[in-house]
Image (tube, helix red, strand yellow):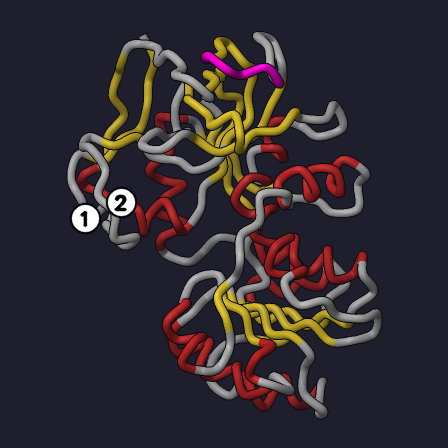
Amino acid sequence: MSKVLVFAAYGGAENQEVVEREVPQPGPGELVIEVRAAGVNPADIMMRSGGFGTRRSLPSPMGLEASGVVSAVGEGVDAFAVGDSVLGHPTAGEGTFAEHAVLDAAKTVAKPEEISFADAAAIPVAGSTAYDVTHQIELEAGQTLLILGAGGGVGLMAAQIGKVHQFTVIGVASASKRELVESTGATFVESGDGVADRVRAVAPDGVDLVVDLVGGQPLRDIAAVAKVPERVISTVDPDLVGELGGAAVVRTAEALAKITDVISYGLVTPNVGRRFSLADAQDALAIVENGHTAGKLVIVP
């Protein structure tokens, strides 16, 4: 038997529970891993609430990224073998807050020895998103990148990617995350009322690219500091960013392998903070849901 965190109905945390199931078996193009760590993301809460507009069979396993050791491979999977260390995304309808998870082989890469399982678990969602959102519009060295929501897992990696490319990085986050944001080399600006004026104080000519990881009113407030509206990209609020003249992030298939390689060389760190057992996974989700996350949270079954 194998434990997994599921939600039994769409809505709040009261619908979550850890249950036991048979160890899953891989289908064609899939592989099963013994999970070593799984990353926690705001998208987990959005999926549980039905926010993506697609309905899953219930009860539905939770979790969108994991690292682990391959225990079984499905038909047509030639790139991986039992015993390999990997990181990746679950196949459709599956989840990673579990002792065993079914991954999509096409969305899985080998885990380099230089990367711990905990750090690797933060790469498929947060790392890939950070890579895509900082490469969608190519900036030159010295140009200014502003990150709204710089204190979370995606934001901290995006700030580090900006430094690798020698951008001038401004990180907008709550006051409690100042030290963490500044540890990436970014200039910290406190979020909240008057944020646009505070940004203009450090970038009076405006910024070359705004990366939004928050959405809603904070995005509306900060968008005006972009030199041109087209250089506002959001990972979370495609409707509003379109209304403002910007664009939603474009996901690419190659991002996972590329950011994994960058992290293996030590150029970017996933900034994993607290670790939770599977039994305490709901506590991790509550922290993310309340917006109190500093860095990346992972579940270690």
Whether residue 73 appears in this view of the structure is yes
Q: Residue at x 63, y 62 (%)?
A: 136
Quarter of the image with the N terminus in it: top left
Q: Amino acid at mark 1?
A: Gly
Q: Residue 19 sits in which quadrant?
A: top left
Left or right: 194, with 268 as reference point: left
Q: Residue at x 53, y 22 (%)?
A: 36
Instruction: State the image coordinates of residue 126 (x, y, percent, origin top left).
Output: 55, 47
Q: Residue under circle 2?
A: 48
The residue tagged with tag 2: helix, strand or loop?
Answer: helix
The residue tagged with tag 1: helix, strand or loop?
Answer: loop
Q: Residue at the left extreme?
A: 9
Instruction: State the image coordinates of residue 254 (x, y, percent, origin top left).
Output: 63, 43
Residue range corresponding to the magenta coloring:
74-79
Instruction: State the image coordinates of residue 268 (x, y, percent, origin top left).
Output: 74, 47
Q: Which of the two residues, 239 or 34, is positioned nearer the viewer here?
A: 239
Instruction: State the image coordinates of residue 68 (x, y, percent, origin top left).
Output: 55, 21
Q: Residue 99 sits in which quadrant?
A: top left
Q: Amino acid at mark 2?
A: Arg
Left or right: 126, with 267 as reference point: left
**Above or below, comparing residue 187 to residue 163 in the picture:** below
**Residue 76 highlighted magenta (yes or no):** yes
Q: Which of the two residues, 251 or 2, is positioned nearer the viewer here?
A: 251
Q: Residue at x 54, y 14 (%)?
A: 70
**Above or below, comparing residue 198 to residue 179 in the picture:** below
Q: What secondary structure do most residues of the magenta stretch adopt?
A: loop
Q: Residue under circle 1?
A: 11
Q: Residues within 10 Å of mark 2 (few under 14, many from 20)?
A: many
Give the Cα distance between marks 1 and 2: 6 Å
Q: Residues within 10 Å of mark 1 (few under 14, many from 20)?
A: some
